[in-house]
Amino acid sequence: MSDLPNCPECGSEFTYDDGLQLVCPECGHEWSRDAGAEPAEDEAVVRDANGNPLADGDTVTVIKDLKVKGSSSVVKVGTKVKGIRLVDGDHDIDCKIEGIGAMKLKSGFVKKV
């Protein structure tokens, strides 16, 4: 087993050492070996309703019925959303929900699985 950390961008376990940098073959992200696990002070950490930090690619569960704007659809409590993507803004999660399609969610209405 490799002692290298997973990719901080996509979570891939197939990272490899390329001299001074670590590289993810799946998303192409490169980062330095001595980069700390904690984000820099100027980076905002997105947290779920329970205070757990979220990252790109995480799976979350909706904790409240959410009305879909412009539609009569509702995202029900307990709906699992796989492969989220974090973005800037009020609705800080981009995702695709089966049966509904692409949506933006607020991190305060989800919990990490």
Image (cartoon, grey):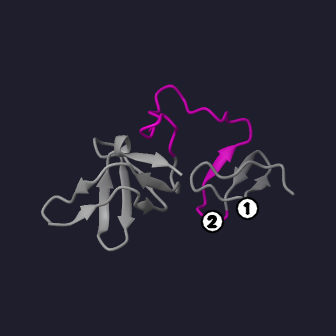
The percent coordinates of residue 20 (x first, y second) are 76, 45
Q: Residue 26's mark?
A: 2
Q: Secondary structure at mark 1?
A: loop
**53 in the magenta segment:** yes
Give, as a three-letter code, the residue at label 2: Glu
Give, as a three-letter code, the residue at label 1: Phe
Toward the viewer: 74 or 85? 74
Residue 89, located in which quarter of the rendered image?
Answer: top left
Q: Secondary structure at mark 2?
A: loop
Query: What residue did someone put label 1 on?
Result: 14
Residue 12, located in which quarter of the rendered image?
Answer: bottom right
Judged left or right of residue 66, residue 45 is right
Toward the viewer: 17 or 72? 72
Going from N to C along the chain, the mark reached first, 2 or 1, is 1
From which residue to which does the magenta span run?
25-54
Residue name at image x 35 percent, y 55 percent: 77
Judged left or right of residue 15, residue 28 is left
The percent coordinates of residue 4 (x first, y second) are 79, 49
**Numbered-mark total:** 2
Q: Residue 33's mark?
A: none
